[in-house]
Image (tube, helix red, strand yellow):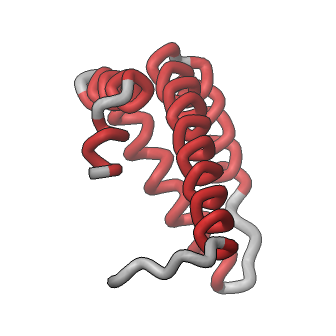
Amino acid sequence: ELGRLLGQTEEYKTLQRAKERVSNERSMITLLNRLSELESEIARALQQGQEPPQAIAEEYERIFGEVQGRAEYQAIVAAQSNFDKVLARVNDEISKGMTTASQSRIILPS
């Protein structure tokens, strides 16, 4: 029930629309795929105890900067932040309910 209600929030719908816009933008997908490849190369070098090659690190920084500057990316970041705030409020309410329930003398059947 909680998941269904969260899925109906405007914040979640906005996040989904932002993700859909990114998935429909070919140039953005190309950039994100290349970032993923570069991350793998960097991780592989680090696991082998080596510094990633300078060219790879520079390409990663350049592409990451380009992605961050795109409106589609900024929309996802903003939407995710707003949805995270909703989840934080839900978690706070759940915690309050658990605290109240733990202090209650009424025992409910399970």
Spot occupied by residue 75 in the image (x, y as percentages of width and height): 50, 20
At x 38%, y 22%, the residue is: 10
- 36 vs 19: above or below: below
Q: Residue furthest toward the front?
A: 106
At x 63%, y 72%, the residue is: 104
At x 43%, y 45%, the residue is: 34
Is residue 28 visible in the rendered image? The answer is no
- 32 vs 50: above or below: above
Q: Residue furthest toward the top?
A: 71
Q: Is residue 43 left or right of residue 73?
A: right
Question: Which quadrant holds the C terminus?
Answer: bottom left
Is residue 76 visible in the rendered image? The answer is yes
- 9 vs 95: above or below: above
Spot occupied by residue 106 in the image (x, y as percentages of width and height): 54, 76
| Of 30 and 80, the residue lying toward us | 80
- 39 vs 67: above or below: below
| Of 92 and 75, the residue lying toward us | 92
Spot occupied by residue 108 in the image (x, y as percentages of width and height): 42, 78
Q: Is residue 28 left or right of residue 48?
A: left
| Of 105 and 26, the residue lying toward us | 105
How many labels sit on residues? 0
**Quadrant in the rendering for residue 101:** bottom right
| Of 29 and 15, the residue lying toward us | 15
Spot occupied by residue 105 in the image (x, y as percentages of width and height): 61, 77
At x 34%, y 50%, the residue is: 2
**Quadrant in the rendering for residue 77:** top right
